[in-house]
Image (cartoon, rainbow, N blue to C red):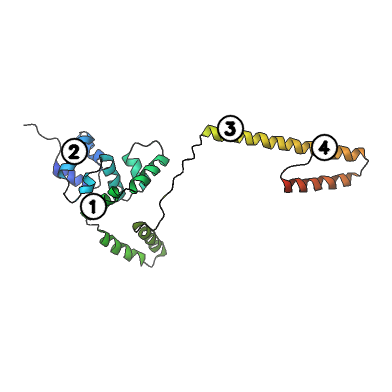
């Protein structure tokens, strides 16, 4: 009879230690799929929602239960191309009821019922140290969903678009500077031709600067 490479008790022990299924697979030198199938068989019956998740979703839940942020949990569970992608995936997963129920199951399975967590949190909220109490309040607001959900906006702008826009703006600024230079030269030339005193010319230049700063551009 073919001897199984894995050990069910050891798998449960590693899961309780917070190991991911990928890490457990590396421990037994088997594929993650083999561990995933075995976990579905041996996991306690009080985790029905958790057992219905995919391997990556289960890993995500375990990472969240270990205290990781949504973004960190997504990066450790899925093959993402950027932190922004991980943030979107994490937010989407946490909005699903199945994920929320699975997290509750994991917490309760390890004795961290919602009632226990609330009582534990209450002791920290009442702590005399403001750093501890404020952090505890922050966690309590997260626990009851007081914070608004994260919003993600995909503006669809590439780096090339930004560089091109910057180039156009630089060109417009240069043209405005040239126009102002021409206007200043015209003021000086016209007043000199009229034999106007240099101090008067300076006053006119200062007046031009004041007006052009108010309008955002010079005069012709």
Cα distance, mark 4 to mark 2? 82 Å
**Which disc is residue 37 wearing?**
2
Query: Does label 4 or label 2 sit earlier along the sequence?
Result: 2
Q: Which mark is residue 105?
A: 1
Q: Nearer the viewer, mark 3 or mark 4?
A: 3
Q: Position of residue 166 (x, y in %)?
A: 60, 36
Q: Is residue 162 left or right of residue 191?
A: left
Q: Earlier in the sequence, mark 1 or mark 4?
A: 1
Q: Residue at x 39, y 35 (%)?
A: 81
Question: Mark 4: which secondary structure?
Answer: helix
Picture quadrant of residue 185? top right
Q: Secondary structure at mark 3?
A: helix
Farthest left residue in view: 1
Measure the C-alpha gap from mark 3 to mark 4.
Answer: 32 Å
N-terminal of the two: label 3 or label 4? 3
Say which residue label 4 marks: 185
Q: Earlier in the sequence, mark 1 or mark 3?
A: 1
In the figure, 188 relative to 49: above or below?
Answer: above
Residue 214 bears which disc, if any?
Answer: none
């Amino acid at each position: 009879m073919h001897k199984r490479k894995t050990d069910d008790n050891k798998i449960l022990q590693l899961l309780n230690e917070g190991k991911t299924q990928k890490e457990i697979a590396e421990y037994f030198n088997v594929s993650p799929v083999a561990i995933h199938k075995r976990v579905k068989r041996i996991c306690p019956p009080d985790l029905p929602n958790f057992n219905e998740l995919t391997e990556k979703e289960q890993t995500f839940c375990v990472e969240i239960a270990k205290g990781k942020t949504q973004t960190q949990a997504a990066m450790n569970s899925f093959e993402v191309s950027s932190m922004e992608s991980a943030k979107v995936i994490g937010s989407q997963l946490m909005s699903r009821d199945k994920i929320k129920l699975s997290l509750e199951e994991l917490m309760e399975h390890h004795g961290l019922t919602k009632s226990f967590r609330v009582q534990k949190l209450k002791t920290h909220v009442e702590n005399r140290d403001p750093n501890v109490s404020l952090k505890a309040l922050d966690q309590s607001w997260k626990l009851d969903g007081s914070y608004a959900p994260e919003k993600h906006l995909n503006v669809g702008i590439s780096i090339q678009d930004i560089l091109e826009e910057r180039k156009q703006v630089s060109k417009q600024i240069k043209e405005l500077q040239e126009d102002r230079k021409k206007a200043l030269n015209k003021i000086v030339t016209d007043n000199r031709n009229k034999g106007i005193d240099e101090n008067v010319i300076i006053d006119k230049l200062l007046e031009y600067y004041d007006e052009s700063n108010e309008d955002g551009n010079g005069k012709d």
